[in-house]
Amino acid sequence: MSDLVLFWHRRDLRISDNLGLAMARQRSPKVVSVFCLDPNILDRDDVAPARVTYMIGSLRSLQDRYAQVGGQLFILNADPRQGVPQLATALGAKAVFFNWDVEPYAHERDRAVISALNDAKIEVTTCWDQLLHSPEEIQSGSGAPYTVYSPFWKNWSSKSKAEPAPDLKTVEGLSDRELAEAQSAGTIALPTAKELGFVWDNPLMLDPGEQAAQERLDEFCSRAIANYRDQRNYPAQLGTSLLSAALKFGVIGVRTLWAATVDATKQSRSDETKENIRVWRQEIAWREFYQHALYFFPELAEGAYRKVLKTFPWENNETYFQAWCDGKTGYPIVDAAMRQMNETGWMHNRCRMIVASFLTKDLVVDYRLGEKYFMQRLYDGDLSANNGGWQWSTSSGMDPKPLRIFNPASQAKKFDPDGEYIREWLPELRRVETEHLIAGKIDDDERDRAGYPKPIIDHVVQQRKFKEMYQQQKQITTENG
């Protein structure tokens, strides 16, 4: 009789290219899996209904995938620190496998689970699955973690990448007694997002589950990746992979992504196409850079990396912040982006940078308020990527440029030159001349007719003000050491 081993799913909701799951199957043909609906995560005030909807859909898809190979995915509505050891003990599991995570809460949770399993004399095996290279693999010559992207990329890109892990083909099923033991340990039927208290009725940019993610990757690599370097910056174009949510929940493996770029490079017929593929690889590396940064510097989750921004005197005008959240700042490109996120649970990356710069550098609002609002809305909301992006835009993070301020009008002129994106999300302005629309120079009568607000601030004035505040704060920081 085969030993029963338990695999604990977290940010790896797939049975293909899953390192920990492949290791569990190598240990024994009798693998049963579990996912915990963790109240320590779901009860937070920064959880997006769209994100929970995508997660539940991906779990439903994962259960179907397990059924196809003769396996079982159990669901626990419990704190994993108690739920996982209790289920493993009830099933008589000889070992528990899971993949590491970079987030601070995950570290604390996982140490507690490992301790409880050790006390129960149950083997524990862990590995890195969500990264092409673990944090320990990519360090400077002195053994320190990187705090600047360029040398990180140089090191990261020079290392060979692993092939995708073997897919799970078959597993042994459980006996009636084992199924009853699992039920007695608290396993439940998978609830809907609404049953968990999260209501999201709008379509998502990407359907949940492995199959949808793989299909999207195939489509992207067959077309858009060949023009990625330029098209990725235009929010009106479908120039990005749209796989951010799939990566956040691990419904597709990062080694699968890399293998797809290898195949695309082999099939490419020009140096230009190969350069476009290289730029997309750089974006994968950016994602890992932020994950490594959070792993080595968990304090990033709470505040700024740079000293000058740690105690910055943010004004935090509530009226300004609410106008920003609602897409009613009077700056078309900013408002279009915010409405896109509010309605779809997703925002184009170029627009994420624009609205983040506007909130912090124009409205002088603490980036952490914007960071949290993003997490309350985005279906691809990921702590390391979201935090890294916000700190980059705020000039508070690991970025060699001391101060970066985006001009909304020049950004719109460059990346939405025909006003196509703005008109899609601000239909009340569709009749405004393009030149005026992208510049935000809309006369008051036209704004009144459209029901569109006047600008809540003057960018030029606020830009000058923020620079002065920054220099004053920099001087104070220098004087205080």
Image (tube, grey):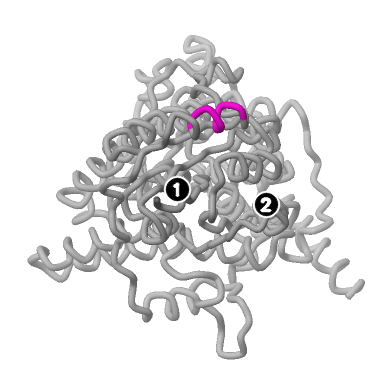
Rendering quarter of residue 315: top right
As drawn, the label of residue 449 is none
Q: Residue furthest right?
A: 480
Give the extent of the magenta segment: 179-184
Magenta stretch prevailing secondary structure: helix
Q: On the rendered structure, is 177 left or right of 395? A: left
Residue at 47%, 16% (x, y): give it. Answer: 446
Instruction: Establish if 26 lies above or below 195.
Output: below
> What is the x, y in percent for residue 366?
74, 44
Quadrant containing the C terminus is: bottom right
Residue 185 in percent (x, y) is at 62, 32
Q: Position of residue 312 (x, y in %)?
A: 81, 54
* Furthest residue toward bottom: 141
58 or 169: nearer the eye? 169
In this rendering, would 204 be left or right of 195? left
Quadrant of the rendered structure where residue 282 is? bottom left
One can see residue 460 in this view:
yes
Q: Tell me the residue at 55%/58% (across/down).
A: 100
The residue where tag 1 is placed is 12
Q: Nearer the viewer, residue 165 or 203?
A: 165
Residue pointed to by mark 2: 113
Q: Nearer the viewer, residue 258 or 175?
A: 175
Query: What amino acid type should be assigned to the residue bearing mark 2?
Result: Val
Q: Is residue 441 above or below residue 466?
A: above
**Quarter of the view holding residue 403:** bottom right
